[in-house]
């Protein structure tokens, strides 16, 4: 069973985290500049989830401290978007970072599917519902369905990392993965400058 806490504007003072946390974001859409950041969810890997609702111009000092704490690894799925969105809206660089989507693409090369739903199903035998993905995350009060959906996006990331770490080791790609993870800040800055299309790395 998960323990979900909805927090307005920032993490509570009593929130404590170990060496790894799982993080995801919910926004009004997928445009980094137009669509505002609404929720940042944090999972501690022990079934506890904090859903931080963010309104415009909120400072969120405790959340920012966690995101920039060099001693705590932040586990994302598709970190490229979340790191860029956090940088754009909260003005901080999230680091250090681990991305389960990148790890999956480096190791599960026979699979065409690297989304969170596919990873949870393939590696953990967990079936996730994506029904609330396009719901109104800017709402003042999150529904119970939204809360559970947001929590599910971070509840399984620690377990996925463990599985993917084993695959990275087996395939001898840990060092390559680390270089990819460290590059995410640069990739996020390029995206925010609209260098995603055309991609400067494209032919």
Image (cartoon, helix red, strand yellow):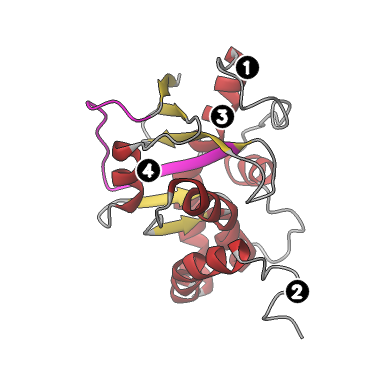
Q: Residues within 10 Å of mark 4 (few under 14, many from 20)?
A: many
Labels 1 & 3 near each other (Cβ < 8 A) = no
Where does residue 133 sit, x and y in percent of width and height?
Answer: 69, 32
Q: Earlier in the sequence, mark 1 or mark 3?
A: 1
Q: Earlier in the sequence, mark 4 or mark 3?
A: 4
Query: Would residue 203 appear left or right of 140 to someone viewing this image?
Result: right
Q: Which residue is mark 3?
A: 150
- Say if 154 sits above or below 132 in the image: below
SS type, badge 4 = strand
Identify the residue at horizontal 61%, vertical 66% (top origin): 193
Labels 2 & 4 near each other (Cβ < 8 A) = no
SS type, badge 3 = helix
Q: Which residue is mark 1?
A: 145
Identify the residue at horizontal 62%, vertical 64% (top origin): 191
Image quadrant where one finds the C terminus = bottom right
Return the residue nearer the eye: 71 or 166.
71
Residue 15 is a magenta residue: yes
Q: Which residue is mark 4?
A: 21
Which segment is the magenta one? 10-26
Where does residue 152 sit, x and y in percent of width and height?
Answer: 55, 30
Q: Earlier in the sequence, mark 2 or mark 4?
A: 4
- The CA distance from mark 2 to mark 4 is 33 Å
Query: Would residue 121 appear left or right of 152 to someone viewing this image?
Result: right
Where does residue 41 sit, x and y in percent of width and height?
Answer: 47, 34
Q: Which residue is mark 2?
A: 198
- The CA distance from mark 1 to mark 4 is 23 Å
Return the residue nearer the eye: 171 or 117.
117
- The CA distance from mark 1 to mark 3 is 9 Å
- The CA distance from mark 1 to mark 2 is 38 Å
SS type, badge 2 = loop
Where does residue 112 sit, x and y in percent of width and height?
Answer: 77, 58
């Amino acid at each position: 069973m998960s323990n979900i806490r909805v927090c307005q504007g920032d993490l509570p003072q009593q929130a404590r985290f170990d060496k790894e946390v799982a993080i995801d974001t919910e926004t009004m859409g997928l445009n980094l500049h137009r669509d505002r950041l609404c929720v940042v969810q944090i999972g501690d890997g022990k079934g506890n989830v904090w859903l931080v609702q963010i309104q415009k111009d909120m400072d969120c000092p405790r959340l920012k401290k966690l995101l920039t704490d060099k001693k705590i690894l932040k586990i994302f799925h598709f970190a490229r978007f979340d790191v860029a969105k956090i940088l754009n809206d909260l003005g901080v660089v999230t680091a250090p970072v681990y991305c389960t989507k990148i790890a999956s693409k480096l190791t599960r090369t026979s699979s065409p599917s690297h989304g969170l739903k596919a990873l949870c199903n393939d590696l953990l035998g967990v079936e996730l519902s994506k029904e609330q993905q396009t719901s109104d995350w800017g709402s003042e009060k999150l529904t119970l369905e939204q809360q559970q959906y947001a929590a599910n996006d971070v509840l399984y990331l620690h377990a996925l990392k463990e599985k993917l770490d084993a695959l990275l080791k087996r395939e001898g790609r840990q060092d390559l993965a680390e270089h990819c993870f460290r590059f995410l800040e640069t990739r996020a800055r390029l995206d925010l400058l609209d260098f995603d299309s055309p991609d400067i790395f494209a032919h």
